[in-house]
Structures are given as C-alpha cells and as structure tokens.
Image: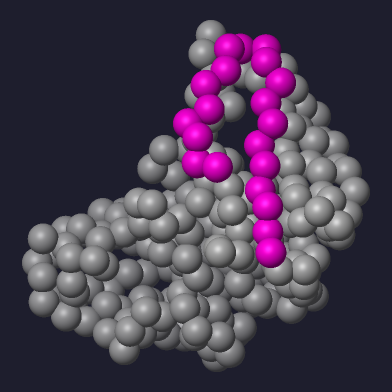
Amino acid sequence: QKEVEQDPGPLSVPEGAIVSLNCTYSNSAFQYFMWYRQYSRKGPELLMYTYSSGNKEDGRFTAQVDKSSKYISLFIRDSQPSDSATYLCALKENQAGTALIFGKGTTLSVSS
Amino acid sequence: GAGVSQSPSNKVTEKGKDVELRCDPISGHTALYWYRQSLGQGLEFLIYFQGNSAPDKSGLPSDRFSAERTGGSVSTLTIQRTQQEDSAVYLCASSPGLAGGNTQYFGPGTRLTVL
C-alpha cells in the first residue's frame, strides 16, 4: 500500500459546480497537510496548508483534515474553467526540513 | 521577488550521456529540495539540502545521481550515464528553512528526455 492514495481522475465538472478532491494516507505520523495545484507544464503551486486536524478556508477553497480517518479533502466552490489543473495532496511528518510525500494527483477539468 | 528558477527548461540527450540540471532557489531560502515527476509515478523526493549540506539523500535512485549546492544558493543535479527510465520532469523547490520550513515553493521544472 502506498503511503498516500489519490484518485487520478480525470474529473470533469461544469462551471459553477462544487468539486471534492480527496486523499487517504496510512502513516499516522503525518502532521502537515498541503494541497498544490499544477497547471500543464508548470511547477506545483501551494494552494492550502493545514496543520493537524480541522478545516481551513481561503476564498472558494476549503481544506479538511480528519486524522482519525487518515483522510484529507479539498473542496472548490463555484468552480471556474481556470481551476482546470492537476491537484496534488502533499503530507509531511514534522516541522524540520523533511520531504513532502505526494499523492499522484487528480486531474480536474471545468467546462464553461 | 523572483521565484525558483531552473535551467534548462527542456533537455534531450542520448542514452549514456551525462546531464546537469540547475536550480536557483528563492533568495534567502536555506532549504532546497529536488523531486522527480514521471508519468504514473507522481512526485518523488530525491534529495534535500539545508545550506550546503545534504542531510537526506534517501530518494536518489542510484549512484548515477548526485547533487551539490554551493554558497547556500544554486544547486546542480547531475545524472551520469543517463538511461531511458531517467526521462521525467525534475523539479526543484526551496523553503525558508528549519524555522519556517513547511511551505515549499517549486520551480517550473526541467523536462529531461533520454533517447
């Protein structure tokens, strides 16, 4: 079993839809949870960062972490064609400079 | 300010040749990371630098891969005797360091194709 599982999609939705993206993980030592967005032929850019369990909201984006279930989610409200990209979850064990462990990414397409 | 930059953006090489990939981190960032992104494999960690030292090299796939960082800034990833399975996008990221280190900022990557 991989450390982080993420459905690769593709996920296609109409403009204005609510999108739910998810990752599950097996290592209970993960404490830091991030979502990156990657456009085609570009580097990943950080969207959301959460420490431990709970919710975090930023504009149309909401990140949720449920450590008891080892499950993290990213919700996108009022999705736009510009949200079409690959979304990667990334997890980290501790504060010190260790590597991020990434899911394989979910490809999202929002049609106008 | 400027973000992470990488060069070249694309590199095509023949099997068996050596290649060097360069990363310029965000100014002042003490931590630097190399990752590899291949089709179907996602992003895989290669090596982490704090300053000029590399406390974690655990992701380097073989001894054909090496990296160095000089002056606490620029880093070079070298792949010797390239193989076709080395074809991937090589991404560099930097972060402020141990104190503020969870936010990693990525460069655009170098797309390596080994023929």
A23 vs B61: above or below: above
* Position of residue B95 measured from the top left corner of the image (x, y, whole percent): 65, 67
Question: Residue A105 or B14: which is nearer the viewer?
Answer: A105
Residue visible at 77% across and 72% down in the picture: A29
- B80 on left or right of A9: left
Q: Is residue A18 magenta?
A: yes
Q: Is residue A9 visible in this depiction of the protein? A: yes
Q: Does residue B18 sit above or below A23 in this rendering? A: below
* Residue located 86% across and 42% down the image: A56
Residue B71 seen anywhere in this rendered image of the structure: no
Q: Is residue B75 left or right of residue B33?
A: left
Numbered range of the magenta stretch: A7-26
User: Going by the image, does A5 lie left or right of A60?
Assistant: left
Residue ID at (77%, 62%): A32
Relative image position of residue A55 (x, y in whole percent): 88, 43
Q: Residue furthest right?
A: A54
**In the orientation shown, which residue stands out farthest toward the front?**
A1
Q: Residue at x 27, y 78 (%)?
A: B79
Tell me: residue B42, above or below residue B57. above
- Give A44 or A90, whichever is nearer the viewer: A90
Furthest residue toward top: A112
**Percent position (x, y) of residue A14?**
58, 12
